[in-house]
Amino acid sequence: MNKITRVIFQLILWLLVLIIIGLNQKDITQFLLQNLLAYSCQAILIVALIYVLAPNFLFKKKYVQFVLYSVILVIAAAFISSMMIRPHMGSGMPPPPARGDKMLPSPIFINLLLITVSYVFATFLETFAFAQKKEEDLVISKSEMMENELKFLKSQINPHFLFNSLNNIYSLSMIDSEKAQQSILYLSDMLRYVLYDCEKPAIAIEKEVTYIEDFIQLFLLKSSKKYPVTTSFTIEDPKLQIAPMLLIPFVENAFKHSNIQNIDESFIAITIHSTASSVLFSIENTFKKGPIVKDSVGGIGIPNVKKRLLLLYPEAHSLEITENSNTFKVELKMDLNV
């Protein structure tokens, strides 16, 4: 609720309380007239609290000033509002039965009690509204940070793929011009995916798979060799939505570190199985142990994907990376129903 709504809500609330109390009096009209000033003081205090005291003192942690001003205003409001009340003289409020010689509470004490209750209640509501607003702002801020993080990670990944692909086409152009032309077609489809589809928060899984297939074909066209690359893609629902560029970094990493040019001693095996609500991705390749060298353009793909998975599917994925003596295996499971 905004400030105006909160003011109206509390004014209506205390007016209803006043009317309910008045229903138990002999003359409700006289009772309401006598308490009109007290109600007006309540209204002024509530407005002052919501628009001045709470935002300028309470929420800025100036607690001493807030308490001091609050006490002064509440006492002043109780004193002013009690000036209209004349006890036992047509007040419409029958005096409570006396016990012995005990005197009845003074009007200023009664109004002080009522105004204090309404002021404390209003302070509680303002504190609750402020805490809720801070939580909403935190969620929005976190969402914006997540979006900026994803854009940054994509900006790292996309040039990385483009750089490697152009290198492959350059090498191929010196060997076979016809294959180079075909490679350019593959690359154009890949760039279309990167430049347009990757701007969306989610894309159909068939587009991610097509990108992987184009990437593999682009690599295989470099040579007439029959590379030991096997794929198994089973897509039950081609329109299943996933975040873009989640799987290709693992594929690119496999081709980069598998030493696939050594046909007799290397391999790459890729499996993608997706249902209407889940994705199982697996890739295994040979590799030689050693330090990972970061390219001059772009970042390392796998760390970026790990960050994106934590941001996008924090409770809906499992990623297992197994490194043996000469093989590297990645298994990624995503439950898209969570």
Image (cartoon, rainbow, N blue to C red):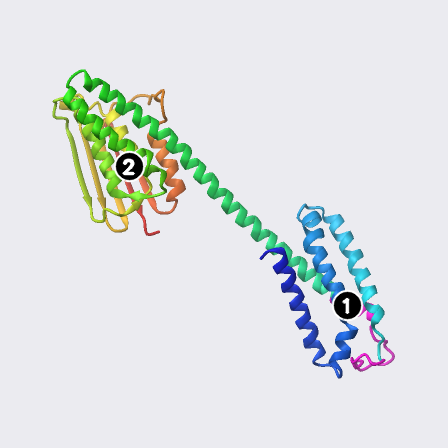
Cα gap from disc 2 to disc 1, whole angstroms? 69 Å
- Residue 106 appears anywhere in the view: no
Provide the residue designation for mark 1.
38
Indicate the position of residue 222 as horizontal and vertical percent values.
18, 22
Q: Earlier in the sequence, mark 2 or mark 1?
A: 1
Q: Is residue 129 above or below residue 14?
A: above
Label 1: how many residues lie within 10 Å, few (<14), some (14-19) or many (20+)?
Answer: many
Q: Is residue 148 magenta?
A: no
Q: Quadrant of residue 330?
A: top left
Say which element carries label 2: loop
Q: Quadrant of the N terminus?
A: bottom right
Q: Nearer the viewer, residue 41 or 266?
A: 41
Q: Is residue 113 magenta?
A: yes
Q: Amino acid at mark 1?
A: Ala
Q: Name, please, the residue furthest toward the top.
A: 174
Q: Name, please, the residue furthest toward the bottom.
A: 26
The residue at 67%/65% (across/down) is 11
Query: So how many labels did they put on this image?
Result: 2
The residue at 12%/26% (across/down) is 226
**The label number, if any, that marks residue 247 in the structure image:** 2
Q: Is residue 266 above or below residue 131?
A: above
Say which element carries label 1: helix
Q: Nearer the viewer, residue 306 or 323?
A: 306
Q: Nearer the viewer, mark 2 or mark 1?
A: 1
Q: Quadrant of residue 154?
A: top left
Indicate the position of residue 141 as horizontal and vertical percent values.
51, 43
The residue at 23%/39% (across/down) is 209
Magenta region: which residues?
89-114
Label 2: how many residues lie within 10 Å, few (<14), some (14-19) or many (20+)?
Answer: many
